[in-house]
Amino acid sequence: LGLLDTKMKAKGRKYIGSAADPNTFNESTCKTILTSDFGCVTPENSMKWDATEPSKGSFNFGNADVLVNFATSNGRLIRGHTLVWHSQLPSWVSSITDKNTLTSVIQNHINTVVGRYKGKIYAWDVVNEVLDDSGNFRNSVFYKLLGEQFIDLAFKTARAADPNVKLYINDYNLDGPGTKIDNLIALVKRLQSRGVPIDGIGSQSHLILGQVGGVQTQLQRLAATGLDVAITELDIRIPKDVTSAKLSQQQSDYNTVFKACLNVPKCVGITMWGVSDKNSWVDSTFPSYDAPLLWDDYYNRKSAYTGADAAL
Ligand code: XIL
């Protein structure tokens, strides 16, 4: 396999990965980079609930299958993303009002999606973003009807559907100190004490230029639970306008974040949330920011790449 990924494996870790889906890896330059630098892919959208089960009991695996075939035929790992999430959730699920119905809907969804790719996925983000910005439980249909136990249900169902896959809880804003990470760690400890089959914690790490100093300390705190940890959706967005000074800062920030993972023995890998700035979700989601990734709009390697590479 390739450059960043090869170097990461030489350090005894599992992978450097990227978000991908047919829309991006069907661009030939993107595909070339995915096969040169990356050893793991996360479906950016194709395994989310709105894509896989748009209406009740009616499943669609078109794009997910294309991604899985690409990854397995090229010897890449896959991080499945994601089974239970309040966002990109079809309204037929969010409008459920009955506890028993929701329980069987969750079970059927997880059994079908995890079962389809049994043995082919390295890790699943079983639940995503269960805490809000303040660190409280998000008031999703899942939490409203089932309470915290929806998490137990999701992990146990996933474990039964694929006994060998790593099962992760995934969330954002775990890169600095505060109530959010405190509450996430407390939640993980409750899951562990109840015997819930959880293997890892994913820290999304959608970061802002110049604000990466806390990453290693917080990652170490997550690892102190005894679980694997991973950086699952890394990007470092630059407040507009992008200048050469800011790109140099980004180079240094990427170096810091890659080193943070390497300095935490339980950090198994880093996933970039995309290859090229051209296709990043940042453009539409954070319009006053830009240029968050390792390759620019024309697929030239940025100084950010040099910063990441130098850590490996
Ligand atoms: C984003 C995708 O990148 C976009 O293409 C999509 O429109 C919205 O979702 N946290 C997550 C990811 O866990 O699934 C999100 O991905 C980014 C934030």
Image (cartoon, rainbow, N blue to C red):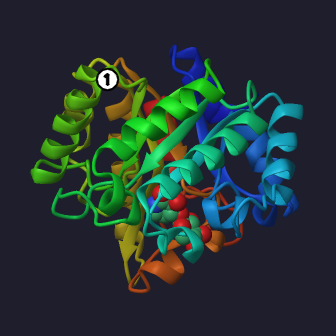
49 on left or right of 288: right
* Residue at (65% x, 73% y) in the render: 278
Q: Considering only vertical position in the picture, is 207 above or below 287? A: above
Taking 288 as reference, is 102 left or right? right
Q: Nearer the viewer, residue 281 or 8?
A: 281
Q: Residues within 10 Å of mark 1 (few under 14, many from 20)?
A: some
Residue visible at 35% across and 49% down in the picture: 252
**Residue 109: x, y in percent?**
64, 49
Residue 214: % across, % down: 19, 45
Q: Position of residue 234 (x, y in %)?
A: 46, 51
Q: Secondary structure at mark 1?
A: loop
Q: Quadrant of residue 86?
A: bottom left
Percent position of residue 277, x then y: 59, 68
- Please determine whether, in this image, residue 40 is positioned above or below residue 6: below
Vertical arrangement, residue 138 with respect to residue 269, above or below: below
Amino acid carrying mark 1 in the image: Val
Residue sitting nearer the eye, 201 or 98: 98
Give whichever of 174, 131 is nearer the camera.
131
Residue corresponding to mark 1: 264
